[in-house]
Amino acid sequence: MAGVRWLLRLIAAAAVTAAGSESQDAGSVGAQRNNWAVLVDTSRYWYNYRHAANVLSFYHTVKRLGIPDSQILLMLAEDAPCNARNARPGTVFNDRHRRTNLYGEEVEVDYRGDEVNVENFIRLLTGRHHPSTPRNKRLLTDSSSNIFIFITGHSGDEFIKFQDWEEMTTNDIGDAFKQMEKQRRYGQIFWIADTCQASTLHKEFYSPGIVAYGSSRKNENSYSHHSDPEIGIALIDRFTYYALDGLQRMSPSSTETLESFTKWFRNDLLNSKPEMRTDLFGRDVGSTLLTEFLAANSRPLFQSNLLQLASDPRRGLDGLGTLGSQRLFGARSSERCLSGLSPKDGAGEASCLSAPGGWSSGGDASFAWDSPEVLLQALRSILPPKLLQALSSMVQGTGSPVMPHLVGAGAGATEGLGDAAVWLLGFAAVTTAGALLL
């Protein structure tokens, strides 16, 4: 028991160390992990088709740059794909050539129709939900989160309309951001509005760490770009169109800054003058990367490792591979173990994890706890280097060679912690990494 307790303390401490390291790196180039996007189309009715295309265009952009659906809150007021007037049902396009259906199967809409209203938007920002509100409708941010907010629709001087029947003012938004600051719900916010008189929407913001950009100034309109004769409606607004022209060339490692972003737009093409507010931000927009808000650089790397394991036909459901499963659990046993059926007595998954000496009698002969190299090799291919390094640094001086092998020194001797401890270490490390990074 003492050994098990020591291992659990080790894993917990390593998790804290790895998390602290990530937090310290959060503002550095390429290390931003805690990015969220709130994308809002406030307009009802078919003739506002372009607003749905605007917000879906940004949805695909941030998703391509690495922000997962679990950290994207998408609000669509009008169900344009299913509108009876849509000549191409189930689709939304942003160009007349109809290259990409923006409303494909992979789109996850979190708020739709009447759910898109002022109350729900403010609740989303401030986290003041009814207890029954599901996770996908919550903005689960903290003080280290960078939040990108894009809103499109119809607005006037210091207000924006929702559903063409209620209004949200710049004071409402500013007060919501102040609540978020007090609740430590954000680190930085990048606000973009593509509406008429868009810059008036950020006039009453008064919380630190916010940079805002509007597609037009007071008394200016924002205009649509082009229409499709078959669909019979304008497909996209000019500001979003030219924003996408630059964003589609970006990758998670791009060096475009907030300042260079503003240079993508020409007043003569927009027929309006975009305006950026930077006095609350506290940083130089010329050195602040767009990817600090629109991308999640390191997350896809970890997910891709998992996908490689899952897609390899030689690998089993447990992530160790069919060959590794046979070495650790015995031929034909690992799948039954994972499904809760013990190869020995059907006692369930607990039996699989509580037999450090192998299946005593009746177990598969090839079960081999004395060969943990396969597990260590699998862990090296799955776990992020920072977690491995944190674990390794904590066992230095204990006389155990297990962690040096795990970090990259090649499998070999496994004495030190013992065979059962090696297995437990691997299992706990995978669990910890999943909780931290997914």
Image (spheres, helix red, strand yellow):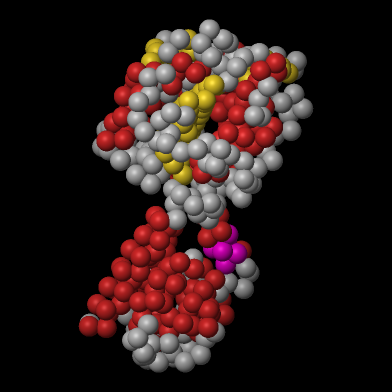
Instruction: Say if the magenta span includes residue 247.
Output: no
Q: Position of residue 368 (x, y in %)?
A: 46, 88
Q: Position of residue 167 (x, y in %)?
A: 40, 13
Q: Nearer the viewer, residue 242 or 99?
A: 242
As drawn, the residue found furthest toward the top would be: 219
Residue 300 in the image, given as x and y percentages of width and height = 55, 54
Q: Nearer the viewer, residue 295 or 81?
A: 295
Name the quarter where the C terminus is drawn: bottom left
Residue 254 seen in this snapshot: yes
In-front residue for pair 410/119: 410
Q: Image check: 233 left or right of 432?
A: right
- Name the side, left or right, on which 257 lies relative to 268: left
| Quadrant showing the N terminus | bottom left
What residue is drawn where x is 75% and y is 15%?
229
Determine whether 286 is above or below 226 in the image.
below
Q: What secondary structure characterizes most of the magenta part?
A: helix
In this rendering, is residue 342 above or below 269?
Answer: below
Residue at image x 48%, y 79%? 406
Count the labels in the image: 0
First to last magenta residue range: 304-310
- x then y, percent, for residue 420: 36, 84
Residue 305: in magenta span: yes
On screen, residue 1 above or below 114: below
Query: Which residue is painted at 35% across and 30% down in the image?
Result: 207
Q: Residue at x 37, y 82 (%)?
A: 396
